Amino acid sequence: MEIQAAVLYRKREKFKIAPVTLDEPKAGEVLVKIVASGICLTDIHVQNQEYWFPLPAVLGHEGAGIVEKAGEGVSAVKPGDHFVLGYAYCGKCQPCLTGAPFACEIYDELNFGGRMADGSTRLHQHGRELSVFFGQSSFGTYAVVNVNNVVKVDRELDLRLLGPLGCGVQTGSGTVLNHFQPEAGSSIAVFGAGAVGLSAVMASKVANCRMIIATDIHDNRLELAQDLGATHVMNPRKVDVVAEIKRITGGGVEYALEASGHAAVGRQAVNSLVLGGKLAYVSAPPLMTGMETSHMGSLTISGIVEGDSVPQVFIPRLINLYKTGKFPFDKLIKFYPLQEINRAVADAHSGAVIKPVIIMP
């Protein structure tokens, strides 16, 4: 079938809206109508080829929409079901079978390899293959995905809001609720108040952390962080973040989440921890040069993928928190039509918008 999609042809080029041919779903796959898709910083990294990915491609990995057709052997969802699309995983390896699909043995291949599990792609243009991203490529009006990607949601929910739960929101909140599991009354610092960091702030409030510190260079993001539950906010261009965190906590925080991807910020996160503290990074790992020597051997530093989340379990949990007013992730979102995807990317890159969401025609 012919669909409309935002195609990325070459490094650092803008997305171009164009007709694309989408194949029928194979066994274990589902044809889905995309209603909306969030733009994640990972999409922008790939656009700039800071993360290598085979081009040309249709990106997008925070899709939400409606099931149109189920392929052979699919019984978990049916036409008409509403869904959020999560990351791709095989469902067959030991990590997948033991409840850790975020550690799937072929995670990189399925999400960043440009192909479906059978080694082919479902997207074509003028006889040329287009790479598929995260097993979904949700910057298009339709997609074919493996049933493992699909998380069924209630029909009464606004689908336009839900796509970001599939990556950025579950990454930040899952790092807190699934990985850290902080004790009530504990302290946490979140470095970088974008969609991931602000999701971590909301999750820290859900977890009843006593002190929730957010840092960012954008004051508008810090204001939103306070609205979402941060007890303290800091702009590193105005204050010595490490010194201030140690002052107000009396020695350091117990948990730190690094969501900026900058090595210098990673070092701030490390040095803000109390002895025995825990650091999780969800982007690039911090360089250890510049780390306080007194911390050596006393910290736990982890790299987290997708918030250690099982999407079919964790996304419904986030939705339930949203319904009860405890997780207002909708405050992060601004909508754009598909035709304005490049403006949405620019607004996200500049920091003017936290989480742009593309609405399909």
Image: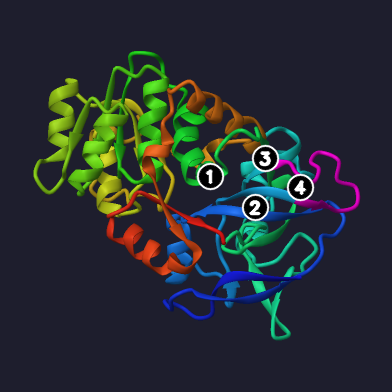
CA gap, disc 3 and disc 2: 18 Å
- The amino acid pointed to by label 1 is Val
Closer to the eye: label 4 or 1: 4
Q: Which residue is mark 1?
A: 305
CA gap, disc 1 and disc 2: 10 Å
- Residue 172 position, x and y percent, is 44, 38
Tally of marks: 4
Q: Is residue 72 magenta?
A: yes
Q: Is residue 318 magenta?
A: no
Upstream in sequence: badge 1 or badge 2: 2
Closer to the eye: label 2 or 4: 4
- Residue 57: quadrant of the picture: bottom right
What crowding class fits label 1: few (fewer than 14 Cα within 10 Å), some (14-19), or many (20 or more)? many
Secondary element type, mark 4: helix
Magenta-drawn segment = 68-82
CB atoms at circles 1 and 2 under 8 Å apart? yes
Query: Where residue 151 is drawn, which disc sits there?
Result: 3
What's the magenta bit mostly, secondary-structure-wise? Answer: loop
Q: Which residue is mark 2?
A: 107
Upstream in sequence: badge 3 or badge 2: 2
What crowding class fits label 4: few (fewer than 14 Cα within 10 Å), some (14-19), or many (20 or more)? many
Is residue 293 something that shows in the picture?
Answer: no
Query: Where residue 243 is drawn, which disc sits there?
Result: none
Q: Residue at x 27, y 55 (%)?
A: 352
- Residue 7: quadrant of the picture: bottom right
Q: Which residue is mark 4?
A: 147
Q: Which quadrant does the N terminus fall into? A: bottom right
